[in-house]
Each structure stands twice: as structure tokens, then as C-alpha cells.
Amino acid sequence: MVKLSVIVPFFNVQTFAPDVLRSLRANAREDFEFILVDDCSTDGTPALLERAGHELPGAVVLRHERNGGLATARNTGLDAARGEYLAFLDGDDWLAPGYYDRLVAYIEELAVDFVRTDHVQCTGRTRTVQRVPHGRRGVVLDPRGAILPADRSTSVDYPYAWAGIYHRRLLDEGLLHFRDGLRTAEDRPWIWRLHREARTFAVAGLLGVFYRRGVATSLTQIGDVRQLDFLRAFDQVIEETALDRNATEFLPKAVRTYCAIIAHHLTNIERFEPQVARALRTKSAGALRRLPPELVKDAVNSMDYDRAVLLRRLRRRPAGATGAAGAAA
């Protein structure tokens, strides 16, 4: 039986793919499989993956005929996975040698549904440890108990799918798939659903994932229309959380996070293409109107002055305002 399936999507990352493939080799084990999903790359990535299919122990290479985005590529890997446990990695990041050995041992020792881990953020030559925002480590925890409080960073604000390991029963229960077609923020509804519906989890202080920031080809660095998928992602968070038995307690947290992300994008609106910036204002204003007014008011009042001003202006924006009116907002 395959012990661990690692799902690694790739899209036009020929510069970085050799690093991740070398790090997977340094984590190979007879009962591990590495599902390498090429999301219709147009550079040298397919050739690198074809070679890895012959040289990397446990490699399974899959290819999309057309680009579907990260969420869809991860789903392709999930559908093919045979492992008792599952993990994710992105095609421009890398691992410490033997990391997955330690991670599998950790989840087996605690016998939980999933484990969340710290990671190392890499920006150029700078290395920074990023920790799961939960203080209790090495013990079995209730995932629902890690959603709140609303006014502090919690586990649902640490959405990275690759920062952890997940038992196959979560896949069988429909909790590990992503919303097909989401180009950004795909981890947000995913982590909320995991914390609402899984039974147990743990936090591990294991460092072994190196997350590369500031990559020019990364979608987080590109200000095109795909960035607006964060709105669809957070709409899903709100819709699903509103149906939860503890919706009254959880919704203030979800709304506050949604408002904060809208404010973040508005603060950095100059990086968007002009037509995308206009759409960002219009669609964000519509999102605020869809949210419970009192929860939006509370969320805005809790923010710093600059973000609060941005959101209050947006709330006053007439429905359907575009062009010069949008620019003035």
C-alpha cells in the first residue's frame, strides 16, 4: 500500500522545477508516490517532468491538455492519489531532506485527521520562519475550536495546503478537493471547510517546507483578472459558514477576514491593470452589500483608520458605478 501521496502542480516553472524535483528525491521512500501534475506548461517544464517520470522514485506524471489553474491541478492529483496520507507541494517551492518521513511519523503517532506545520518563507536570500497561529503543539485538538477568536489570527488565517499532511479519510469524506477553476485564494474555503468538518487535528513545529515568495511568474505577483477570484473564494467561505450550526459565532470571523482581504487589495490597487482595478472596486462593493450589514460595520470599525476609510467609501459607492466614479472611490 502507498503510505503517502504528494501532489505537486507545475505551470511554467522550468527555472524552479529542478529544485523541487531534487528535494522530492531526497524525500523518496518505497511506499511514497509523487504525483506531478503539469497544468499545460508552455516552457521547458514538461520535458523536466518527463525525465523525472523515469528518474524520480515513485513519480507519476499527469498532464492537462489545457490550463485549469492550481485548484483544478490539485484536484487532478487527488483523484489519482492512492496513499493512506496526502500532502501538497507547489512547483516552485522545495523541501528539506527526510521531511516527509518525520511528518508521516508525526501524524501516525497522534492519529489525527490532519496536521498543520510551520514553514520557511524565502524572499530572495532572506529566510523567515512562519508559524501556525496556534499555541498548543503536539496534542490532539478540535479543529472547530481553532477558528476563533474573530479579532486575532487563527488557524483558518494560515491557509497553505502544503503546510501539513492529511489522512485519506478526509478525501473519502469530500473534504480535500478544491473548488475547480479558482485561480487564487483556493486555499481559503478549503481550510475553513477542513476546520468546520474534520474531527481532530494537531500542530507540529516541524520545519521542512521552503516557500518561495516574490516569483515573477507567480499569480500573487500578477495584477490581472485572475486575482479577482479571491471574491468567489470568500463568497464560498461565507455561504458555507452561514449553514454551519455555529454560524452566529463563526460568521463575524469570516466577514472580518473577507473585509480585510478586500482592503488589502484596494490598498495595493496600483499593481492591477486599469480595467481590473475598476472591476475590483465594483465587485468588492457588491460583495460588501451581500454581507450582513451589522457584521460589516463591526468589521470596519475594528480596523485601522486607512483601511476603514477605504471600506467605508466602498460601501457608499452606488451599485453598478464604473469609470470615473469608480476611480474616485
Image (cartoon, grey):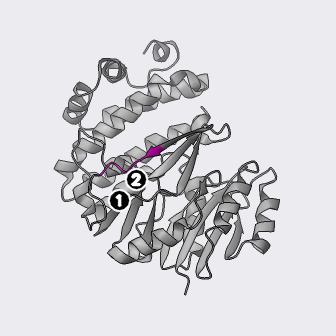
Where is residue 220 drawn, in percent x and y? 57, 39
| Mark 2 element type | helix
Residue 235 in the image: above or below residue 145? above
Q: Is residue 85 visible?
A: yes
Q: Residues within 10 Å of mark 2 (few under 14, many from 20)?
A: many
Asked if residue 132 lies in the magenta stretch, the reply is yes
Residue 226 in the image: above or below residue 97? above
Q: Which residue is mark 2?
A: 189
Q: Quadrant of the N terminus?
A: bottom right
Mark 1 and mark 2 in contact? Answer it, CB < 8 Å.
yes
In the rendered structure, the answer to whether residue 45 lies left or right of residue 70 reads right
Where is residue 86 drawn, in percent x and y? 50, 71
| Nearer-the-camera pick, 56 or 312 | 56
- Give the Cα separation between the discs numbered 1 and 2: 6 Å
| Nearer-the-camera pick, 294 or 127 | 127
| Nearer-the-camera pick, 186 or 155 | 155
- Disc 2 marks which amino acid? Pro
Q: Main secondary structure of the magenta part?
A: loop
Q: Which residue is mark 1?
A: 193
Start-end of magenta stretch: 129-134
Residue at image point 76% right, 63% down? 49
Q: Is residue 170 visible?
A: no
Where is residue 286 drawn, in percent x and y? 38, 32
Numbered circle sitting on residue 97: none
In the rendered structure, the answer to whether residue 306 lies left or right of residue 249 reads right
